Structure formats: structure tokens, C-alpha cells
Image (spheres, coloured by chain):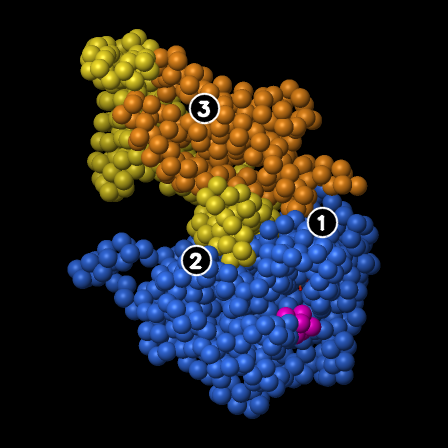
Chain colours: A blue, B yellow, C orange
């Protein structure tokens, strides 16, 4: 085998979407057998670059304006998909959109068929990889029943079974809790150490990687390489560059807030939960009855307990004007709780809004008071233009505003969120992070008194995270807004939230004090 | 006993048999034939397939309603002797008109209704005894469907569980933004179309990243073949239908 | 056929979406046809939603604007519906073929160059007529009295005009405006007209 130093070489690549230049003469080398991390502000072109490096962009009818990409010394243009896959494959952010079959075993067969592995070898190869990554139990489960972490692990299995020499991951942990993320990282580390695989990861959070990465590449706007080959030893000398670019830096402390400064304007409870039991969504009442009957006959064992997501005995109160963070493993039911709070999911027990049982409040009135930002931003956009999107929201709540004022207000907000340059762009053509920011902004521009945010800062760089959180804070102070948000990021919770609950073993535990202590410990 | 399952019948051959049967049936009006085909399908499903009785019944119910609807329609409005709208609105004449119309229309009505039943029988027989992947693989191998279409179809089908969930979320997301969403509102549909396009781009990328290419050769894990028995079964069934058409009295 | 994988996926998912909407509507249609059954007009109950059936084909040909786009989209929709357990099974592949031809016929005559409202509406009308002809033979509608058939045809045409004629174009143009169809013929046309 030929020894090669560079797994991927990007040479002077220029790429544009319509008139907008996304990558401007970018050159870059990824060393073989190392873990390289690509970081950079949201919208700087990280995803675009990784798609180009893995040969998925440009599509057939587009072309690069200039430049070439080489993988293991071969021009990527000359490789067909199936040949290329042996050199480089990619794992994507959204775990739901990576598979074309319905079980992992079939998906792995699909991969092997692609690279023309003879039929007789398929089964043994699949078994071996499954054992290696210890996913035997996942092989025949329907993929849509797996948790986010399991899905990403499954995706990794597929890339592994192809024996790809380099894998590129675009924000692979965006939907995962820290335990699943750490799990995946240690798998990736093993792949590097045992098989010499090259791993390139795009991520905003550096903390997960800090013990395993070999080098960091920092991108500026238009994919400009600000610094190439930052190693663990030289990391600390680059801190000012990271901070200037608004990118997360390990153990970054600056946004420590003086908690309770906003101090809860009064101690009025605005939302309370009591004796709450929430079951999994998939089961209708009828199914449930049937299952219980079956259980009684001992035919089918699925415990009542397995169906319950949340079983909250003690009362929880969310104070008016406060910010609460909800932590918990992915898939543990935080989002379902939000749905229940808005009467979109059945529950037992009581939920009160402002002293009234929400069962007695009309849905329309409830949603006038309680707003929500979902994980998938595509569902919330109403218009085809970024500026309009914000304006519509402001106008809905502020009918009397005149149009100049409206424009100015909307533009100011966009400026804050680093979206002003995109005001004429369609919301659907933004980068992942930009899209989510716009979704948060468009709900924040409304006038609801309580906001529920599902992972508001995922996929955001440090600067955007701070902007989002401080905007929420200032709105809490000025309008008495109450904020409840979910997050996987303990640090974020510890530095911004007035109180923190962790969903553990089906009930919420107040961990406010504890996480404060733990944070200063680190 | 396991050899006698129609699940093993080559799906493409099965499909063409069903389609040819439909074409044969559509040029004749004998009630015995159509009902016979329906019963035949039921028997095949119950005795020679792994289809669960419950699922058969479940899917039969809407089909029966459709057939019943056509039956009543034929009863009223056959071309031989239809009740004009005048008759219906004129209450006093209804019983007479009904009686008169029914006597001549009963047969056409039965023809219309039983035809729907026969088609449904054939359709259900196919749906419940055919594994989706086996079917698509067979389309690839026997009908030269290109892998691009085959895997594209499978991927789309496997996204169905996401669709309903996201649709509900979209409706709800609009409501909470203060946008009114009615039953006939286009907004959630629009959001779903954007989602669909977005998903298709993402999944296509994921598949291509895993080495899927349109024109390169590939191996196959499942490779359905057409054997003598597949063809024989098909010929037997079609001849049976032709024979029935020629010999049935009504 | 220069279909890309993502085109197949898009049409596949969208046809499932239209299928689900159609199914939702047939619940309404079921009630309507239940009410109409005693009057002997049960088949009429489903006619108001017939246009939704044509939407996959209309969408495909409108977005991709190349030969076969309408027919293949309808066939894809039919195969998928068959996989999802429609009670007519593979038979709907036949009707899908007829619908695809119906929608695409006129547009092909115009060499895939004209996509105005009148064209789309006319294509929808042709599709309605063609599918009724298919029903005459295959579903045995030739047994039904002519005035009733005409009534069905009228309702079907109106439905087709609304759904596959007007609504499809409306939605596609909005999608193009939102930029999500930039990889397709309709999106490119839109981008050009913007400049
Ligand atoms: N399809 C598209 N058409 C036009 N512009 C696009 C398109 N996709 C992305 N862009 C723009 O390209 C730029 C880079 O996008 P990219 O997704 O590569 O950013 P990113 O660095 O991955 O950001 P994030 O961290 O938010 O994911 C962004 O400014 C975005 O608005
Ligand atoms: Mg990105």
C-alpha cells in the first residue's frame, strides 16, 4: 500500500450559490490517521466545505468555480460514488435522514451491495462489524424506534462496514445527550487508534473532543482558513482568535451571569405541574387497553412502566419572569412535556397556567400566552423571505406599528442575530444554525408571556448562543417573560438558568444548587 | 406446507397475473365470474398464505363499502332504466319507480358491485401476500426497474412514519405563532412540501455518500428469479378465469 | 431517463404526502358518499377529491418539465400506494398510468414549454376525461346512466381544475419563490425571471 500523508487535499476551491460566494479560494489539507476538527462561526461554510470534501457537492449540473479536491491522492471528480465511498464517507447531523432501509441490517446490506461485495460475504461482514461496535441488539430493530444516539451509532456502523478510510462528520452530536456523545467519541477514537482511520468532524462544541483531537482548523467567513493545525499544545495561545470569531473555546467562562439578577419580578407562579403522568405518544387509549389485556394474559410483555415517560409526584412551579432549564437524556420526554403544556399531548394530573387549569383554557387563548420553538425550524416559517418572517411576527402582536418603524425594528433584530445580510434570502436556504436562529427570533418577536424552547442553542456558535440567551434575559427583564428551555448543555444551563431540573428516572429533580457546585469544581 | 405459500410466488409474475385478470374481467359482466374470483382470492389468502385473518377483514371493510355503494348506484341509475331526479323528488311516485327500476337494474347493480369486489379481492391478495422488499427487488430483476427508482421508492416508504408526526407539528407550530390554520389551510401542506424536498436532498446525499451510484454495477442480497412454477401458477389462474367467463351462465 | 436519485425521492415522498391528504379527504368523502348512498350516488362522494389524485403527476411535470415526468411521477405514486396497502393493490398502477398520460398529454404537445394556468387547467380537464373513459371500461361505469355519468364528470373536472390545475401551480410557484426548487427546471426558470 502506498503511504500517503494527506487523506484529503482541498486546493483553491471557490464555490457559490447563485451570486453569493460561500467558499472563496479555500485550500486545506487533512492529515491521514488523525482526528481533525473543523470549527468556525455559524454560516462560515463548514457544511458546504465538508460536502465538497466528500464529493457530494457540486451536483452534476453545477461545477466548482475553481479548485480541485483530492482524496488519498486521487481527484475526487474521477471517482464514481462506489469507489469514492471506500476512501471517504460522510455522517450527517440529522440522525433521521441517513437511512433508506428500515433496519440497520438491511441498511448495511445496502451499503455492501453498493460496493459490490459478493452476497455470501455480506452476512459475516455485517456480524463482525456489529460485534466490533457492539450493536448486535440494534440490527433488526426498526430504525425509527431507535434513540438519536443509537441512530448515530448505526450510521457509524454503515460507514465502518464500507471500510471507508476517512469519515467526515457534520455536527454529529447536535441531537445527542452528553453520555451518547462521549460514547461515540470513544468509538471514533478507537477507530483512529486501531485502524488508522482519518476522522474529520465539524462541531461547535469543543469540550467533547478536547482529549482526543489531533488538530483544529478554524474557518472565518467565506471559508477562509484562519488557522490550520492548532494542536492541543498550541490551543491556549489561540484563545483570543477563537473568542474574536465567536467560537466556543474549552472551559470558556465569560458568560457567567449573576444569577437571579433579573430577579424574578415577584414570586408569582405562572405554570405549575402537579401529579403529572405523561405516557409515550405512540399509544392511543385503545391500544393501551388492548396491551393491558394482553399483559394480563401474559402474552406480550411490555410493562406499564415502559410506556410512562414522566411520572412527577411532587409539584413543580415555574415562576413568572424566571428562566428554567430542563436537562435529561435524549428521548426522555422533554419535548413531550412541552406538547402537554400546550394541550397537544394527553396527560394525567394537573397543569395550571396562571392559576387556571389548562384544560379549561381554550387552545387559542393558551397559545396567545404560551409560545414554543420546535426543533425542526422548517415547520414554523410562514413567509419566503427572512425579513418578512420577522416582520410578520412583530405585526401580529403589534398591529398599530407603522411600516418604517417595523422595518427598523426587524432589521435591528436580524443584525443582532447575524442575519441582516440574508434579509432577502429565503429562510429555507440558510445554514442549519442560521435557520434555527431565525426560528427563535421569529417567535421571540411575538408577544407571548411564556416561551418554551426546545434546544434553542443547538448548532450555534458561542456568539449566537450568547445573543439568543441574552435576548431572552433582557426580554424577561423588560416584559416579565418566563422562559423554559431544554438543553443537553449543562454549562449553558448552569450559566443562564435561574433554576435547573433534570429529568431522571421519570421525574424532575431540582439540580440548581448541585450544578452550580459542580461547575465551579471543574 | 411452507412450499405452498403464495408469498413465494414471484411478485412480478404475480403482479402481471393480477393485472391481466383485471383486464379479462373488465370485458365481461358475469356475476358468477366476478364473485368467483373474489372467493378464490379469499381462499388463497386464508389457506395458502401467511396473511393474518384480521388484516384481511380490516382491509376488506372499506372495499365492501365501495362495492355496496356501486351496487346501490347501479340499482338507481343503471343506463337501462334509471330513476330520473324527478321521480326521486316526487315522493308519491318513489315506491313505484323504485320497484320498476329495481327489477331491471338489479342485475346491472350486482355486476357493478361484484366487479369492485373482485378487483379488491385481487388487490388485497397481492398486497397482503407480498413483501415490499421482495416486490421491489423483483421489479428490479424482472422488470428492469433501475436501482435508483427501487431504492428511492423504499426510502420514501420508510419515511412515512415521519410524515404524520411532522404534519401535526407544522399545524401546531403555525397555531402557536398566532397564524390561523383551518382544515383546508395550505400553510402546513406547504411546510410539509418543503420538508419533503429537504428530506429527499438529505437522504439522497446520505445514500450517495454510502457509495450508491446510478449506473455502476452492484451486487444483490435478494435476487428473485422466475421459475417454472411461477409461470405455471399464473397460466393456471388465467385459464381458469377464461374458462369461467366462457362457461358461466350469468 | 435522466432522473436523479433525489428526484425519485422527492416525488416519492411528495406522492406519499398527497396520498395521505387524499386519504384524509376520503374520510370526508366516505361520509359524503355514505349520505349519498341511499340516493344511489355513492360514487359521487369521492369525485370532489379526485383532483388530489392527479396532483402527484401535475406536480412532477410542472417541477421537472421533461418528457415522462408526469407519467413516472404518477407511477411512482401508484407503486408506493400499492406498497402501503391500498385495497386495489397493483391495479392502481394501471390507473396511475392513465392519470399520468392524461396530465402529460397536453404539456407534451406544447413541448414542455408552456406552463400557464390555462395550460395546467386544460391538462387537468383532459386528465379527468381520460380517467373517466378508463372507469367506463375497467370499473364498469358504462352500466351507469349517461346523465349521472355527466354529473360525475362535471364534479371531477371541477375538482381537477381546483387541485391539479390551480392549486398545484400555486404551490409550486411559491416553492420556487422560496428557493427550495432551485435544483429543478421550475426553480431555474424562476431564478432567471428574478434577474
Ligand atoms: N442552498 C443554499 N443556497 C444559498 N445559500 C446557501 C445554501 N445553503 C447554504 N447557504 C449559505 O451558505 C453559507 C454557508 O453555509 P453552511 O451551511 O456551509 O454554513 P455552516 O458553517 O455549516 O453553518 P452552521 O454552523 O450554521 O451549520 C451560509 O451563509 C448560508 O446562508
Ligand atoms: Mg452546518
* Vertical position of residue A335 compared to residue B217: above or below: below
* Vertical position of residue C11 compared to residue A450: above or below: above
**Marked residue nearer the N-terminal end (2 or 1):** 1
Closer to us: C191 or A164: C191
Crowding near pointer 1: few (<14 within 10 Å), some, many (20+)? some
Front tag of 2 and 3? 2
Report the span colored magenta.
A462-469
Q: Mark 3 points at which residue?
A: C155
Q: Tell me whether marks 3 and 1 sit on the same chain.
A: no
| Residue pictured at 41% horizontal, 40% vertical | C24
Q: How far apart are marks 2 and 3 (CA)?
A: 36 Å
Judge from the rendering whether residue A166 lies leftward or rightward of residue A277; answer left or right: right
Q: Distance between the residues labelled 2 and 1?
A: 46 Å
* Vertical position of residue A159 compared to residue C59: above or below: below
Q: Distance between the residues labelled 3 and 1?
A: 47 Å
Chain at numbered mark 3: C
- Name the mark on residue A363: 2
Mark 1 CB within 8 Å of ligand 1? no
* Vertical position of residue A404 compared to residue B231: above or below: below
Q: Mark 1 points at which residue?
A: A58
> Residue C125, percent across and down?
54, 22
Chain at numbered mark 1: A
Amino acid at each position: 500500500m502506498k503511504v500517503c500523508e494527506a487523506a484529503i487535499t482541498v486546493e483553491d476551491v471557490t464555490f457559490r450559490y447563485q451570486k453569493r460566494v460561500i467558499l472563496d479560494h479555500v485550500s486545506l489539507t487533512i492529515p491521514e490517521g488523525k482526528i481533525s476538527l473543523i470549527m468556525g462561526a455559524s454560516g462560515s461554510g463548514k457544511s458546504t466545505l465538508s460536502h465538497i470534501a466528500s464529493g457530494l457537492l457540486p451536483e452534476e449540473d453545477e461545477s466548482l468555480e475553481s479548485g480541485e479536491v483530492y482524496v488519498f491522492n486521487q481527484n475526487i471528480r474521477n471517482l464514481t460514488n462506489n469507489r469514492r465511498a471506500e476512501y471517504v464517507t460522510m455522517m450527517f447531523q440529522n440522525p433521521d435522514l441517513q437511512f433508506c432501509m428500515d433496519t440497520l441490517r438491511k441498511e448495511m446490506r445496502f451499503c455492501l451491495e453498493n460496493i459490490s461485495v459478493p452476497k455470501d460475504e455480506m452476512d459475516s461482514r455485517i456480524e463482525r462489524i456489529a460485534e466490533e461496535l457492539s450493536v448486535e441488539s440494534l440490527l433488526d430493530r426498526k430504525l425509527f424506534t431507535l434513540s438519536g444516539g443509537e441512530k448515530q451509532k448505526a450510521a457509524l456502523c454503515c460507514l465502518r462496514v464500507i471500510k471507508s478510510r476517512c469519515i467526515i462528520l457534520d455536527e454529529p452530536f447536535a441531537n445527542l445527550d452528553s453520555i451518547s456523545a462521549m460514547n461515540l467519541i470513544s468509538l471514533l477514537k478507537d477507530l483512529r487508534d486501531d485502524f488508522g482511520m482519518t476522522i474529520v468532524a465539524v462541531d461547535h462544541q469543543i469540550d467533547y473532543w478536547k482529549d482526543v483531537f489531533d488538530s483544529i482548523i478554524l474557518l472565518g467567513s467565506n471559508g477562509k482558513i484562519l488557522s490550520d493545525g492548532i494542536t492541543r499544545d498550541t490551543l491556549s495561545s489561540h484563545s483570543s482568535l477563537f473568542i474574536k470569531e465567536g467560537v466556543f473555546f474549552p472551559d470558556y467562562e465569560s458568560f457567567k451571569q449573576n444569577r437571579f439578577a433579573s430577579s424574578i419580578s415577584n414570586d408569582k407562579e405562572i405554570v405549575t405541574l402537579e401529579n403529572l403522568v405523561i405516557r409515550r405518544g405512540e399509544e392511543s387509549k385503545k391500544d393501551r387497553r388492548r396491551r393491558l389485556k394482553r399483559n394480563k394474559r401474559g402474552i406480550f410483555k411490555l410493562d406499564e412502566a415502559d410506556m410512562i415517560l414522566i411520572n412527577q409526584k411532587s409539584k413543580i412551579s415555574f415562576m413568572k419572569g424566571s428562566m428554567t432549564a430542563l436537562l435529561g437524556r435524549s428521548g426522555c420526554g422533554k419535548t413531550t412535556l412541552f406538547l402537554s403544556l400546550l394541550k397537544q399531548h394527553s396527560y394525567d394530573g394537573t397543569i395550571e397556567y396562571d392559576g387556571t387549569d389548562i384544560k379549561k383554557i381554550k387552545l387559542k387563548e393558551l397559545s396567545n400566552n404560551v409560545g414554543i420553538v420546535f426543533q425542526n425550524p422548517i415547520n414554523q416559517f410562514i413567509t419566503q423571505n427572512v425579513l418578512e418572517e420577522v416582520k410578520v411576527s412583530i405585526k401580529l402582536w403589534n398591529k398599530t406599528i407603522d411600516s418604517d418603524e417595523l422595518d427598523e425594528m426587524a432589521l435591528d433584530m436580524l443584525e443582532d442575530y447575524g442575519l441582516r445580510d440574508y434579509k432577502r434570502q429565503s429562510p429555507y436556504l440558510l445554514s442549519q444554525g442560521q435557520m434555527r436562529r431565525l426560528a427563535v427570533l421569529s417567535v421571540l418577536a411575538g408577544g407571548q408571556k411564556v416561551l418554551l424552547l426546545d434546544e434553542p442553542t443547538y448548532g450555534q456558535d458561542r456568539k449566537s448562543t450568547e445573543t439568543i440567551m441574552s435576548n431572552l434575559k433582557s426580554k424577561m427583564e423588560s416584559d416579565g417573560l418566563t422562559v423554559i428551555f431544554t438543553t443537553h448543555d449543562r454549562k449553558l444551563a448552569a450559566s443562564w438558568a435561574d433554576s435547573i431540573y433534570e429529568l431522571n428516572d421519570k421525574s424532575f429533580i431540582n439540580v440548581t444548587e448541585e450544578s452550580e457546585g459542580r461547575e465551579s469544581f471543574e | 406446507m411452507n412450499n405452498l405459500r403464495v408469498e413465494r410466488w414471484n411478485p412480478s409474475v404475480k403482479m402481471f397475473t393480477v393485472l391481466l385478470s383485471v383486464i379479462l374481467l373488465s370485458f365481461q359482466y358475469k356475476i358468477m365470474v366476478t364473485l368467483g374470483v373474489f372467493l378464490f382470492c379469499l381462499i388463497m389468502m386464508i389457506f395458502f398464505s401467511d396473511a393474518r385473518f384480521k388484516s384481511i377483514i380490516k382491509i376488506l371493510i372499506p372495499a365492501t363499502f365501495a362495492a355496496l355503494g356501486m351496487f346501490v348506484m347501479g340499482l338507481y341509475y343503471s343506463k337501462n332504466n334509471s330513476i330520473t331526479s324527478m321521480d326521486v323528488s316526487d315522493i308519491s311516485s318513489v315506491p313505484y319507480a323504485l320497484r320498476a327500476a329495481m327489477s331491471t337494474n338489479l342485475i346491472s347493480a350486482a355486476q357493478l358491485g361484484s366487479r369492485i369486489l373482485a378487483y379488491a379481492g385481487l388487490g388485497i391478495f397481492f398486497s397482503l401476500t407480498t413483501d415490499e422488499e421482495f416486490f421491489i427487488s423483483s421489479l428490479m430483476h424482472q422488470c428492469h426497474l433501475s436501482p435508483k427508482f427501487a431504492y428511492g421508492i423504499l426510502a420514501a416508504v420508510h419515511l412515512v412514519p415521519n410524515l404524520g408526526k411532522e404534519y401535526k407539528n407544522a399545524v401546531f407550530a403555525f397555531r402557536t405563532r398566532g397564524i390561523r390554520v383551518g382544515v383546508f389551510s395550505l400553510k402546513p401542506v406547504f411546510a410539509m412540501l418543503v420538508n419533503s424536498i429537504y428530506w429527499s436532498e438529505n437522504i439522497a446525499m446520505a445514500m450517495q455518500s454510502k457509495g450508491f451510484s446510478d449506473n455502476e454495477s452492484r451486487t444483490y442480497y435478494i435476487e428473485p428469479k422466475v421459475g417454472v412454477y411461477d409461470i405455471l401458477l399464473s397460466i393456471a389462474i388465467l385459464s381458469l378465469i377464461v374458462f369461467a367467463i366462457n362457461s358461466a351462465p350469468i | 431517463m435522466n432522473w436523479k436519485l433525489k428526484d425519485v425521492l422527492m416525488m416519492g415522498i411528495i406522492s406519499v404526502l398527497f396520498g395521505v391528504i387524499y386519504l384524509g379527504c376520503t374520510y370526508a368523502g366516505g361520509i359524503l358518499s355514505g349520505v349519498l348512498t341511499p340516493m344511489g350516488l355513492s360514487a359521487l362522494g369521492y369525485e370532489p377529491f379526485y383532483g388530489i389524485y392527479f396532483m402527484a403527476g401535475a406536480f412532477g411535470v410542472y417541477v421537472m418539465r421533461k418528457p415522462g415526468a408526469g407519467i413516472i411521477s404518477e407511477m411512482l405514486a401508484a407503486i408506493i400506494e400499492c406498497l402501503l396497502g391500498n385495497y386495489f393493490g397493483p391495479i392502481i398502477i394501471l390507473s396511475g398510468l392513465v392519470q399520468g398520460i392524461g396530465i402529460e398529454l397536453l404539456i407534451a404537445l406544447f413541448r414542455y414549454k408552456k406552463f400557464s394556468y390555462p395550460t395546467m387547467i386544460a391538462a387537468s380537464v383532459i386528465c379527468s376525461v381520460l380517467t373517466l373513459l378508463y372507469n367506463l371500461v375497467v370499473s364498469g361505469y358504462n352500466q351507469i346512466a349517461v346523465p349521472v355519468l355527466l354529473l360525475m364528470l362535471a364534479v371531477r373536472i371541477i375538482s381537477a381544475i381546483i387541485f391539479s390545475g390551480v392549486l398545484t401551480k400555486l404551490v409550486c410557484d411559491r416553492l420556487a419563490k422560496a428557493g427550495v426548487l432551485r435544483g429543478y427546471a421550475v426553480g431555474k426558470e424562476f431564478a432567471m425571471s428574478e434577474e
